[in-house]
Image (cartoon, helix red, strand yellow):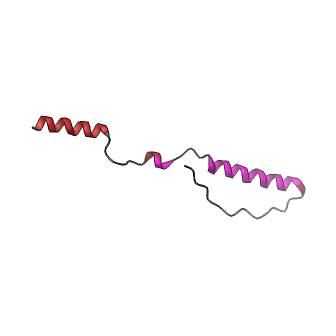
Amino acid sequence: MASITSDSLPSPTRSSGRAGHFAEFRAFWRQFFAKAFNPYRPELYYMRGPGPACRAKQAASRRRAS
């Protein structure tokens, strides 16, 4: 799940007319999409403990020991 944080927007530029507003609009949406659809999700790589391969290996070593 992506989290979106609020960052302060840069101060308005002193460019004239619609070009300045369009540049701000593009910058806002570019930043929004970059943060909202970031493919990196660290929770998918968090290791929660030994998996099934580790349990199978331990069970095999216990069988050989007994």
Residue depicted at x 27% and y 40%: 54
Residue 10 picture quarter: bottom right
Q: Is residue 5 above or below residue 46?
A: below
* Residue range highlighted in magenta: 18-43
Location of the C terminus by quadrant is top left
Q: Is residue 26 left or right of residue 39?
A: right
Residue 51: x %, y % from top left: 32, 41
Q: Main secondary structure of the magenta part?
A: helix
Residue 62: x %, y % from top left: 15, 39
Residue depicted at x 78% and y 55%: 24
* Residue 20 highlighted magenta (yes or no): yes
Q: Is residue 60 above or below residue 43?
A: above
Q: Is residue 37 left or right of residue 51?
A: right
Residue depicted at x 57% and y 50%: 2
* Residue 23 highlighted magenta (yes or no): yes
Given residues 52 and 15, the one toward you in this image is 52
Q: How many marks?
A: 0
Residue 63: x %, y % from top left: 14, 35
Residue depicted at x 42% and y 49%: 46
Q: Is residue 62 left or right of residue 38?
A: left
Given residues 41 and 1, the one toward you in this image is 1
Residue 18 picture quarter: bottom right
Residue 23: x %, y % from top left: 80, 52
